[in-house]
Amino acid sequence: MFGTARRKCPAALRVFVRPRVTRRFTQEILGHPKVEVGGKYVGFIRGTKRSERLDERHAAMERLELHVVDYIDDGPRADRTPTFHRGDTEFQTQEFRRLEKRYPEIEHLGSWHSHHPNQLRNLSSGDVEGYRDTVNAQGHNHDFFFASLGTDSRGFASARHFLFVRGDRHYYELAAENLIVTEAAPGPAGGTVAVPDPAARGPVPLSVPGWTDSPQGQERLARDRDLMAKYDGLRHVVRSDRIAVTGQVVWAGRVPVTLHVLYPSSAHATDGLLKVTVAGSQTLEVSLSGDRSGDLAFALGAVESIAQCAADLHHRALHRPTGPPARGGRSGPRP
């Protein structure tokens, strides 16, 4: 946009980010190598949230602390391509309102998205214009908007971070000194700020005929919730009156695996679907229908085998000979 420029953030500004956020950020990129991904940052502000004049907002930047505790993911109706990203606004708004009831002080701090399919390292003019419109909107609850750009498969480690200010034609890039990854942020008098975690969510309320109205279905759902409690990245969703478990698990502590388990239409049916995707230098995708396809315990067991297969394929590709073996010596081929 004409008349805008990127500037450096004030050295005293601090953005504290929980390690969980950096892990999810990176896993989301690794799990979707061919499309842009992103999410909405949520957390808390320490400092002056709203000021009448731009010079007062600039002064507030010097003392500003943003505490990023999590992000709301794209949602089931997100629009994502190799060159475009738009989250499911209805889903994200509903998730934020649910968090707001539990943590009244929580704020929508900003958002992140990736350019990793094309590895462009700069915000597009559309990105800048969209973030400026958001921070200037009357409904935005404070004067700042924190934006991150994932540029490649290293995820958060190589991301760039920016701050937009209400009424400011410029925007600001954070330096390493502005960004701190930590579980607990420094607080007044050397203490700590205990920031509650909005990711500590209870079970998703489900009401689906054929499942929640039968003892067998209720027992199965309770068992699956116990399984899901062992994984950060899995959640129940309901789409077109069908229950699914979707999200990511990390195999062997390093390989993100995307999992989608569509439950059968009822607890007695066999029309479920299992889809497992392991992304990396080579993407391996496995789909399964039939008796065991909607069984979450079976699906999690299958992840182990599928991820190991993907790792073996990757290892073989790295160690494949580059050409045919030599057949003769310096004097020519053997007879």
Image: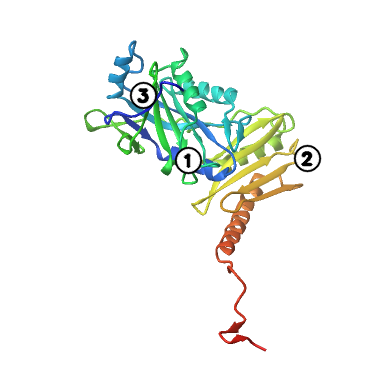
Residue topped by disc 2: 269
| Residue at horizontal 65 percent and vertical 44 percent from the top | 296
In percent of width and height, residue 71 lies at 48, 32
Q: Residue 227 is drawn in which quadrant?
A: top right
How crowded is the residue under tag 3: few (<14 C-alpha within 10 Å), some, or many (20+)? Answer: many
Circle nearer the N terminus (2, 1): 1
Residue 151, numbered circle = 1
Residue 45, numbered circle = 3
In percent of width and height, residue 185 lies at 32, 33
With 28 as the anchor, is 214 left or right in this view? Answer: right
Q: Are marks 3 and 2 in contact (CB under 8 Å)?
A: no
In percent of width and height, residue 215 lies at 70, 35
How crowded is the residue under tag 2: few (<14 C-alpha within 10 Å), some, or many (20+)? Answer: few
Q: What residue type is labelled 1?
A: Thr
How crowded is the residue under tag 1: few (<14 C-alpha within 10 Å), some, or many (20+)? Answer: many
Give the mark count.
3
Circle nearer the N terminus (1, 3): 3
